[in-house]
Image (cartoon, grey):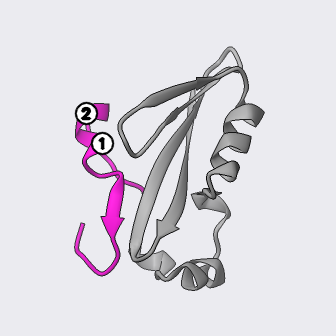
Amino acid sequence: MSDEWWLATLGRTLVWARLRVRDAGTAEVFDSDGNTLAYDSEDTARAALMDAEFVAFDGIDAQDALERGFDLDEVQPPQADNDEALRAKMFHALGEPR
């Protein structure tokens, strides 16, 4: 399995989503509402995220971040021991400490 973090901006809020690719080639997205959405492939999951105006966090450079209203050096994907705890961290108001 491999994980990728995606984000969208909603005003002054970052909204996170985690794309997880399974060994079998299927994928799932853990969304900001705490739902795990299953997809038949990584490409389908990526397309769904892009349709929802998310971008891959590892594809953002400093200029992209500034255009979205945040400093890339001050933002990192949320972390938690389990998905229940992670759910509470999937929204991040810009300018507030983590």
Q: Residue at x 24, y 76 (%)?
A: 96
Count of residue discs: 2
Q: Nearer the viewer, residue 87 or 98?
A: 87
Prevalent SS, magenta region: loop
The kind of residue tagged 1 is Arg
Q: State left or right for residue 94 relative to residue 50.
A: left
What residue is drawn where x is 70% and y is 20%?
Answer: 40
5 relative to 95 in the view: left or right: right
Q: Residue at x 30, y 42 (%)?
A: 87
The numbered dot on residue 87 is 1
State whether residue 61 is above or below residue 31. Answer: below
At horizontal 53% and vertical 58% (from top left) the residue drawn is: 7
Q: Residues within 10 Å of mark 2 (few under 14, many from 20)?
A: few
The amino acid type found where label 2 is placed reads Glu
Label 1 Cα neighbours within 10 Å, binned few <14 / some 14-19 / many ≥20: many
Please tell me in which quadrant of the rendered image residue 91 appears: bottom left
Q: Position of residue 6 (x, y in %)?
A: 56, 53
Instruction: Determine the CA span between mark 1 and mark 2.
Output: 5 Å
Q: Position of residue 74 (x, y in %)?
A: 39, 76
Residue 14 falls in image quadrant: bottom left
Q: Which residues are magenta?
A: 77-98
Secondary structure, mark 1, is helix
